[in-house]
Amino acid sequence: MGMAETLLADQATPHAMQWLNKPPGSGAATPPHQDGFYFRITPNEAVTFWIALDPVDAENGCVRYVPGSHRRGLVRHERSRTLGFSQTVADYDAEDQSSEVAIYAEPGDLVAHHSLTIHRADPNCSTRQRRALTAVYLSARARRDVEALTRYQEQLKKELAETARI
């Protein structure tokens, strides 16, 4: 937790761990998003540690970050229709795309990003695995915004119901 506390300038609380897997030849891109959109915390102060388990490059879907995007605050998201990612940044434009930084990694490499950093990943077009683990830590100042979480869940249920009718 020492690194999380240094990056957050506060005591850190473990929040979640996640296994990520982009199998060889998978056609699913990870849409541009901010992890903090899903966390529904105030203030939106959290750090995600992304740990590569396989070599990661452009061919197998490396993570791409928009530098400085955490300074924008929480941006508007909309329904993505991507399994596992209900939302995407609504106004992701050519300027964001041109400023992206692709992060290549080797097994064991750790990348950290703020909960408001906009990031995405391409599909895995290779014959290799692209697996990773994430560990999320919240700032001790961060509190769950129960009302915002409830509104989001209700909106998501409504969107899913509408999609089922199409």
Image: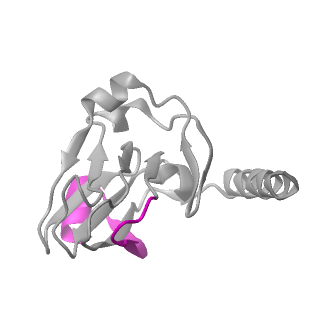
Colour scheme shown: one colour
Give the quadrant of the N terminus: bottom left
Q: Position of residue 116 (x, y in %)?
A: 41, 44
Q: Position of residue 63 (x, y in %)?
A: 29, 53
Figure quadrant of residue 70: top left
Task: Please indicate whether residue 69 sits to the left or right of residue 155 in the image.
Answer: left
The front one of 62 and 24 is 24
Can you say whether 31 is above or below 83 in the image?
above
Q: Position of residue 144 (x, y in %)?
A: 58, 60
Task: Please indicate whether residue 40 sits to the left or right of residue 33 in the image.
Answer: right
Figure quadrant of residue 13: bottom left
Name which residue lies at 35% across and 51% down: 122
Can you say whether 164 is above or below 109 in the image?
above
Name which residue lies at 52% across and 28% down: 91
What stretch of residues is rendered in magenta? 1-27
Name which residue lies at 33% across and 71% down: 24
Label total for image? 0
Figure quadrant of residue 93: top left
* Residue extending furthest toward the top: 95
Task: Please indicate whether residue 131 sits to the left or right of residue 145 in the image.
Answer: left
Does the rendering let one see residue 9?
A: no
Task: Please indicate whether residue 92 sits to the left or right of residue 100 in the image.
Answer: right
The front one of 41 and 164 is 164
Task: Tell me if residue 61 is in the magenta stretch.
Answer: no
Can you say whether 99 is above or below 32 in the image?
above
Can you say whether 131 is above or below 87 in the image?
below
Q: Position of residue 163 (x, y in %)?
A: 79, 53
